[in-house]
Image (spheres, coloured by chain):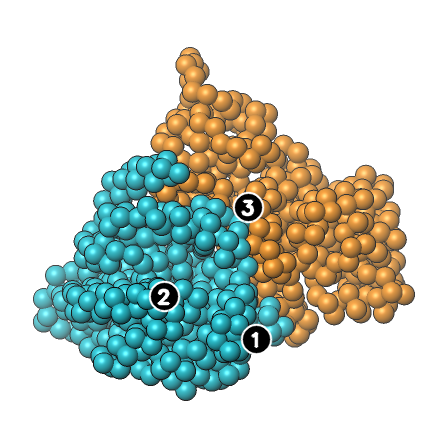
Chain colours: A orange, B cyan
């Protein structure tokens, strides 16, 4: 049993901070409250000396292994970049490459306070292996693509993956999903919707990332936006969510609200690829639920939830012309509670008794966190990977004061660069 | 003499990286080149093991001591925020408060790789004292305000400050400046322009930060923008620069280019206050010189040049709709060379023999810097305070591996919070 004491404990449900302690037994939080006398024998007692203990960040849209493409082909618009640069490099992927670069992502996630990635990528075997080995929670998301002719086979494969990985490990699960309207025939999306009904399971996909995608979708689908197409096909019958959702109409927002589906925003990626600014202030006002993802390192390039929260807030201030738009508490909740809820992880919502212990400690003695006038704006507007002191995933400390407990960083970096050399050599 | 070896040395003039070593004698860089055999006795030899050695960041627009207002009154538009919240709190300032919170800013600057602040704030005595004590380079910028009736007296005070501080210390100097068109009568600006001629000295001021400021200026000045007003009064006769410059016409850009004046951009502050996105891609294309500032912690809230470079790039991509807009090299040069050049510090431009040793070391073994495919986009798009390993100002190591050499951090934070308690109590 682990005891954190002298902690300032941030609840993101209540958005308040209370002084006290948190006990973790196995993978569970078993006590949250005031300092108390006890006969309990702890394996480890950690004096936080006033530092902030809070839920870890949940990265609700990731392509973790895309760390192998960080800084490759920078400065191109999405569609060209995707089709002429990224897809050809991805042809070279193997399970081992995905395994290797998912571990590299895990190292960055842990140091940045992220414990869960909603990972839509190739070779789930590689993702699962890297996750179990490093202690990262990966919720793998189906990324099915394809035409009508192969629809049955394609979606069968998705169902097999779903059944193989949904209860694979305490750290590894699987959710139904497909890539996007523009890479899927209706026949594929219909069959995924059918799977959703069969398993009462939510469905996720890229949606409305660029203006061009929406225009082309309307051409293909008699004037319907991607969100309308998904709704029409019954894809959101059990909720789920759309990744990006940059170019959304009021009606699209209403569909998301009505179906209880999440907008999973990726502000950094959308900015770098010049895709646009999502209408998050409008979505929030309309009652649409929000989560945040980093997207892949190829289009970001960092895997940093502090920067996502920051950008989410300031871009709304810029795009609406209202400096009060997008309160910090909305961004912080989206980055923690929202991510867990959107992935259907009800045990990972907050620092409460009975919840699973995915948590981080923020070093309040960094100059950027001082003076302590208002902690939440300090976190959202001044936070950075630099302030993360400790990261715990599933009750296990995976990172503390610059050191990893599950990762040999020097070996990981050496092997990652060696593998990059070979991948890029092949041209 | 200090020797850095096994270094990857980034020159921001050439934008290339060479392997080798850098020697520092006193405050000067005396050797940059390949590894070489030598009989020289070094006081300190530092093996960088392949880490990146580069010029430190130069913060070209700061109100350093505004750390006392971090996270205070978040989420308000500029003019209301300034007049109803910030100015009343600033009434409470004393030299000691400025001294204390400039030191707090120094702690954040050093850890974030910033060694110089172009600091427009009250009580230059306090700024100078904090700078000399911590080893921070502060180029104090006049921030004169006032009406016609006091113009003579006001500008006399500016001249006195200028003469007192321009050669005060190797770490402290002074530049002519006034606050802005909207806080200065023509009589004040004219007299500052006259001082500029008397001393052949450049002049700096806030300019065109909000749309409202420009509209009101045009009403006051027969349709002239702030930049036109400054040009008309001869303020830019010796160059200088405008802070912010968000709402600039093509003609304004041409004035800046023609006079060799800098646009000193503050993308984070402009975003948070919903002031807008500066036309930096257009300015760069027009040949206007660019530098970057953090502005005060009150409107940012971090003092983080990585985030400024990042935002500078992605906001141009968003505002122009061109994902290739604002190359990373332009942002990196603006954050280093541009800052030094704009403040007229020709010895602080780059890592070259004869230059003053203001430099930083980037830890390339952070996951966010890996794999090493392209270092400059890694820095600009994945960099954060977390990757700064060492900071040297004026030949002195002020920060290394989490430790300060000139600052007692625990004492500084305790005193800063204690002082904040009193300032905020007074209402």
The residue that disc 3 covers is A328
Q: Is residue B386 above or below residue B54?
A: above
Which residue is most to the top? A39
| Residue at (49, 32) in percent of width and height | A17
How far from the left and from the top, in percent, is residue A400? 40, 41
> Which of the labelled discs sits on residue A80, or is there none?
none
Q: Do tags 1 and 3 sit on the same chain?
A: no
Choose top left, top right, bottom left or bottom right for residue A38: top left
Disc 3 crowd rating (10 Å Cα; few below 14, some 14-19, many 20+) is: many
Is B122 in front, or is A260? B122
Compared with B257, B321 (above or below) is above
The disc placed on residue B324 is 1
Residue in view at x 37 percent, y 29 percent:
A47
Q: Secondary structure at mark 3?
A: helix
Q: Earlier in the sequence, mark 1 or mark 2?
A: 2
Is the C-beta separation of discs 1 and 3 under 8 Å?
no
* Tag 2 residue: B147
Q: Are marks 1 and 2 in contact (CB under 8 Å)?
A: no
Q: Is residue B127 above or below residue B312?
A: above
Which structural element holds mark 1? loop
Viewer-proximal residue among B168 and A101: B168
Please name the residue shown 66% across and 34% down the image: A346
Q: Label 1 vs label 2: CA separation?
A: 45 Å
C-alpha separation, residue under disc 1 versus residue under disc 3: 30 Å
Q: Position of residue B140 (x, y in %)?
A: 27, 64
Along the horizontal axis of the image, is B118 left or right of B334?
A: left
Relative to A286, B407 lies left or right: left
Please state the horizontal and vertical placement of residue A185, each as a whole percent of the image. 84, 62
Q: Is residue A76 visible?
A: no
C-alpha gap between disc 2 and disc 3 = 39 Å
């Amino acid at each position: 049993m682990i005891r954190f004491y002298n902690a300032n404990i941030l609840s993101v449900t209540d958005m308040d901070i209370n002084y006290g302690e948190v006990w973790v037994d196995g993978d569970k939080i078993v006590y949250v409250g005031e300092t108390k006398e006890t006969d309990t024998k702890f394996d480890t007692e950690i004096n936080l000396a006033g530092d902030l203990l809070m839920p870890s960040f949940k990265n609700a849209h990731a392509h973790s292994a895309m760390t192998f493409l960080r800084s490759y082909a920078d400065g191109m618009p999405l569609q060209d970049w995707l089709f002429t640069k990224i897809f050809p490099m991805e042809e070279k992927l193997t399970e081992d490459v995905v395994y290797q670069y998912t571990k590299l992502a895990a190292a960055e996630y842990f140091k940045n306070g992220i414990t869960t990635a909603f990972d839509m990528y190739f070779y789930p075997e590689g993702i699962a292996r890297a996750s179990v080995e490093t202690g990262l929670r990966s919720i793998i998301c189906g990324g099915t693509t394809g035409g009508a002719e192969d629809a049955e086979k394609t979606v069968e494969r998705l169902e097999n993956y779903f059944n193989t990985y949904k209860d694979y490990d305490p750290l590894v699960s699987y959710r139904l999903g497909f890539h996007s309207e523009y890479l899927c025939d209706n026949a594929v999306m219909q069959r995924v919707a059918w799977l959703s009904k069969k398993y009462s399971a939510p469905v996720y996909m890229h949606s409305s990332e660029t203006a061009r995608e929406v225009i082309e979708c309307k051409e293909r689908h008699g004037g319907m936006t991607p969100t309308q197409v998904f709704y029409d096909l019954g894809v959101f019958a059990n909720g789920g969510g759309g990744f990006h959702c940059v170019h959304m109409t009021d009606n699209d927002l209403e569909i998301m609200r009505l179906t209880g589906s999440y907008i999973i925003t990726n502000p950094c990626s959308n900015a770098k690829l010049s895709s646009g600014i999502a209408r998050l202030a409008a979505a929030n006002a309309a009652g649409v639920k929000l989560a945040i993802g980093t997207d892949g390192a190829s289009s970001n390039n960092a895997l940093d939830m502090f920067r996502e929260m920051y950008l989410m807030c300031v871009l709304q201030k810029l795009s609406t012309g209202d400096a009060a738009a997008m309160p910090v508490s909305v961004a912080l909740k989206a980055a923690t509670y929202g991510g867990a809820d959107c992935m259907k992880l009800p045990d990972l919502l907050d620092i409460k008794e009975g919840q699973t212990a995915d948590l981080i400690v923020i070093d309040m003695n960094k100059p950027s966190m001082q003076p302590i006038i208002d902690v939440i704006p300090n976190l959202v507007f001044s936070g950075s990977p630099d302030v993360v002191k400790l990261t715990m995933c599933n009750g296990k400390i995976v990172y503390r004061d610059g050191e990893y407990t599950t990762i040999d960083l020097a070996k990981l970096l050496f092997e990652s660069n060696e593998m990059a050399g070979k991948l890029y050599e092949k041209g």
